[in-house]
Image: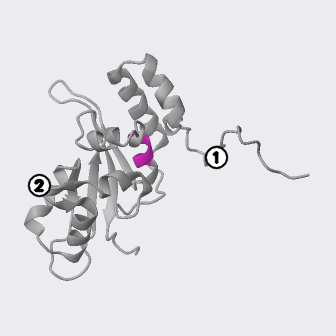
């Protein structure tokens, strides 16, 4: 007798104690929900679930995070994102980093511009409805990319809407993370 699961059995997601479940990590459930929920309402529900669960810290380096694979191979102005990440880490062409990253939905939240040593860059991936990253993930058929990115990132930042600004949400990743003290 074997302990194999039947092929139709769904994988069970184990949630660490203290972290609420994010149902939007299940792409199938996300797809069904999007069939009957308006876009803005679906976005609000997903951001709420991300905020309650927090950052997963599974793969905090943007060069390796599985959730960012679609973006890393994306090309703008003849250069793939993974190549720009390498240039940031090596410290070359620093004047191009911020505007170029913006094409993929990233803000350069902090970086060491010194010519020597680690960059210690912090990248903020825009998770908002109008994020430029949305097009890349939509073309790849990944609708729940925000939840997947939140599982990999080191920190989630959510800014509630105000009278003058819409809601904003960011997944923070590192490049060349600072050494632990």
| Residue lying at 15% horizontally and 80% vertically, measured from the top left | 115
Q: Tell me where residue 22 appears, x and y as whole percent.
A: 52, 37
Callout 1: SS: loop
Q: Residue furthest right?
A: 1
43 lies left or right of 148: left
- Residue 31, compared with residue 156, is above or below; it is above
Magenta run includes residue 147:
yes
Q: Tell me where residue 108 appears, x and y as whole percent.
A: 20, 57
Distance from Cα at disc 1 to Cα at disc 2: 39 Å
- Residue 161, compared with residue 149, is above or below; it is above
- Residue assigned mark 2: 99
Per the rendered image, the range of residues in magenta is 146-150
Quarter of the image where the C terminus is located: bottom left
- Residue assigned mark 1: 14
| Crowd around label 2: few <14 · some 14–19 · many ≥20 (10 Å) | few
Q: Nearer the viewer, residue 97 or 57?
A: 97
132 lies left or right of 27: left
| Crowd around label 1: few <14 · some 14–19 · many ≥20 (10 Å) | few
């Amino acid at each position: 007798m074997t302990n194999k699961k039947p092929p139709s059995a769904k994988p069970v997601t184990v949630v660490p104690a203290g972290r609420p479940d994010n149902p939007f990590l299940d792409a199938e459930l996300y797809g069904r929900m999007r069939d009957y929920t308006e876009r803005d309402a679906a976005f609000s529900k997903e951001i709420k679930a991300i905020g309650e669960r927090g950052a997963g810290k599974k793969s905090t380096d943007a060069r390796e995070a599985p959730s960012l694979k679609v973006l890393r191979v994306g090309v703008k102005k003849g250069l793939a994102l993974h190549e720009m990440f390498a240039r940031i880490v090596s410290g070359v062409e620093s004047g191009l980093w911020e505007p170029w990253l913006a094409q993929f939905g990233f803000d350069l939240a902090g970086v060491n511009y010194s010519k020597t040593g680690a960059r210690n860059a912090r990248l903020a991936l825009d998770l908002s409805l109008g994020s430029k990253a949305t097009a890349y993930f939509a073309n790849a058929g990944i609708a729940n990319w925000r939840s997947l990115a939140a599982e990999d990132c080191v920190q989630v930042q959510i800014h509630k809407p105000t009278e003058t600004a819409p809601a904003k949400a960011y997944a923070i990743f590192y490049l060349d993370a600072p050494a632990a003290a």
